[in-house]
Image: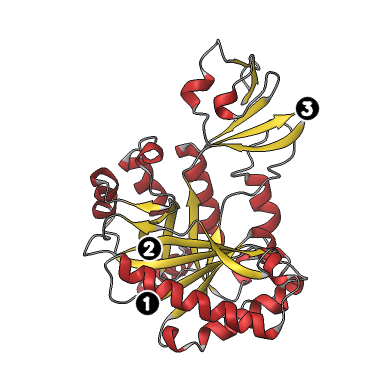
Amino acid sequence: MRKISILVIFVFFLFACKQKSIVHTTFYFWRTDYKNNKSETEYLHQFKSKSLYVRIMDVDFNPDFQQDIPVSPIKFSDPLPQQVNIIPVVFLVNRIFNQIDSNRIKLLADHIAVFVEAKVKQAGKSNYSELQIDCDWTKTTRDHYFNFLNHLKIHPLLKGKNISVTLRLHQVKNVATSGIPPVEKAMLMCYNMGNLRKYGEQNSIIDQKEMDIYLKDYLENYPLKLDVALPIFEWAVVFRNLKYAGISKRISKAQLRDKKLFKQRGNTILYDLLIDYPAAGLRHGDVIRWEEISPEDLLASSKFLSRYLKPEERNLVFYHLDIDLLKHFTNEDFQKVIANF
């Protein structure tokens, strides 16, 4: 009887402890010129990354030409490291699916397949196994977008390749209206959660309350296999006359500490510009909201996700590969996050 009791207790604890996933860690590369930066490549070695998600281009509709065109395509000044495979990523502006007919959908799929094939070769790779499509589709664009994905899946250049998509939090919760993309795998984008355009002190990059609302009761039942993307980026959100005026790529945290330029509002993340700053396209009186991610933010998000994600083999992808961002985190910071999955 005693042996049976011990066995029962062992089995109980075995199933009570949630099974961990097999995790492959890597990064997005989101700049328009790939150069083999030794410090950045070292992170790929450190995490034993077998692949790198590389943004190939954006695609938007050009009303002058009445067609979908590539925007800011990447160039490869250097080939990707030999041991790292490429996962090309194409960002599609959602509005291109608002008014699009079946012929244009087929043409779009063909142009993307051909363009990606050429860029992969420029990256020094003879082949690739996965193409990721990044699009924040909505209820009104869903059918056209899903039709486009189906055309991609049967394209001759994509035969034998996986098509994956990005997945926003609202698409997890509102699955009845958002639908399930006709693919096998999705990348859960765990950033850009809050209202970027809303004036105030909130951090729009990551928000635990938003994760609770959109994921807590829905994530475990989402039917697709899920990879996960976490943020390590930072940015300066600009407000003019209390209205959103864009993101400034010319403002750094070091500049915000310059008391001749900015005045911080107490201990908040808001900064008032004290003079005109034409070099950055800013005016006296503009307000900057500095948003960034801390190691604690990443750790809290990983703990939350580990509770609700189904245990399975997945990619954990940090956005994005940039030494200026990576230096804010230690190897121990990253390892703690990875361990939670």
Give the residue drawn at x 61%, y 72%.
Answer: 222
- The kind of residue on which mark 1 rests is Ser
Depth check: give the residue in front, 165 or 35. 35
Q: Is residue 276 above or below residue 323?
A: above
Q: Earlier in the sequence, mark 2 or mark 3?
A: 2
- The kind of residue on which mark 3 rests is Asn
In this image, 10 relative to 331: left or right?
right
Which x, y percent locates residue 315? 41, 64
Q: Which residue is mark 2?
A: 23
Mark carried by residue 241: 3
In this image, 84 relative to 293: left or right?
left
Depth check: give the residue in front, 9 or 157. 157
CB contact under 8 Å: marks 2 and 1:
no
Q: Earlier in the sequence, mark 1 or mark 3?
A: 1
Which x, y percent locates residue 139? 76, 70
Spot the residue most to the front: 64
Dot in front, 2 or 3: 3
CB contact under 8 Å: marks 1 and 3:
no
- The residues tagged by marks 2 and 1 sit, at their Cα atoms, a distance apart of 18 Å
Give the residue drawn at x 39%, y 68%.
Answer: 87
Pointer 1: residues within 10 angstroms few (<14), some, or many (20+)?
some
- The residues tagged by marks 2 and 3 sit, at their Cα atoms, a distance apart of 45 Å
Pointer 3: residues within 10 angstroms few (<14), some, or many (20+)?
few
Question: Callout 3: helix, strand or loop?
Answer: loop
Quarter of the image for the N terminus: give it: bottom left
Mark carried by residue 129: 1
Q: Earlier in the sequence, mark 2 or mark 1?
A: 2
Question: Callout 1: helix, strand or loop?
Answer: loop
State the scheme by which the image is colored: secondary structure
Pointer 2: residues within 10 angstroms few (<14), some, or many (20+)?
some
Number of marks drawn: 3
Question: Callout 2: helix, strand or loop?
Answer: strand
